[in-house]
Image (cartoon, rainbow, N blue to C red):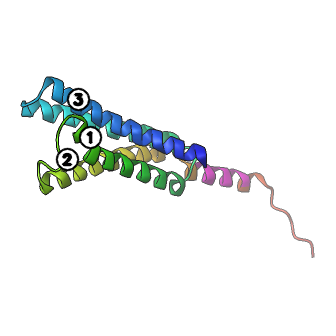
Amino acid sequence: MKDRWRVLALLAAALFAVNVAARVVVKLGFEGDDAAESRVSLAMFLAIGAILAGLVFRWGQHRSVANWGGDVAAAVGVALALTVLVGPLLVGQNPFDGGVATLFGEIGVYLVAAAVGVLAGHLTLTALGRDHRSRLLKRYAEIKTAKPRRPVRR
C-alpha cells in the first residue's frame, strides 16, 4: 500500500512539474506575448495528456480499469489542485487574479486534457488487445478449448 501512494504522489508531482515548467518558461521568456503563452499552454496540456496516455497504457496491461482508474483520478485531482492554487504563486501571481471564469476555465481545460490522455491510452491498449480484460478473456478461451469433452457415464 505504501508503494501505491508513492507512485500516485510521483504521478501528481510529475503533472505539477510540467505545469510549473510551463509557467516558468512563460514568465522568463514570453511574458506579455499572448500567442506564445497560448502555444506554451497547449504544449503543457499535450505533455500532460501524453504522460497520462503512456501511464494508462502501461498500467492497463496488468491491472483492471477499476484498479488503476481511481489511482489516476486521485493523482489528477491532486495535480489539478496544485496547478490551480499553488502554480500561480510560484511565479508571483495570485491564483484568483483572472476571476472565477478564468479559474474554472483552467480547471475545465486541464480535466479535458487529462481525460483525452487517459482515453487515448486506454483505447489504444484495448484496440491492440493487450488490456487486462482482453488477456483474461483470451486465457479463458484457451483453457476452455484445450480441455477435451468428458463423456458422461450412465
Residues shaded magenta: 135-143
Please state which amino acid type lies under the numbered disc 3: Val
Residue sitting at 42 percent across and 48 percent down? 75
Residue sitting at 61 percent across and 54 percent down? 137
Q: On the image, numbered disc 2 is attached to which residue?
A: 95
- Label 3 residue SS: helix
Q: On the image, numbered disc 1 is attached to which residue?
A: 87
Residue 21 image point, x, y percent: 28, 30
Magenta stretch encompasses residue 82? no
Per the rendering, the mark at residue 24 is 3
Q: Are discs 2 and 1 less than 8 Å apart at CB? A: yes
Label 1: few (<14), some (14–19) or many (≥20) C-alpha neighbours in 10 Å:
many
Residue sitting at 19 percent across and 31 percent down? 40
Label located before the other in sequence (2 or 3) = 3
- Label 2 residue SS: loop
Please state which amino acid type lies under the numbered disc 1: Gly
Label 3: few (<14), some (14–19) or many (≥20) C-alpha neighbours in 10 Å:
some
Magenta stretch encompasses residue 142? yes
Tell which of 14 and 28 is nearer to you: 28
Tell which of 144 and 74 is nearer to you: 74
Tell which of 129 and 84 is nearer to you: 84
Residue 90 image point, x, y percent: 25, 36
On screen, residue 96 above or below 20: below
On screen, residue 33 above or below 121: above
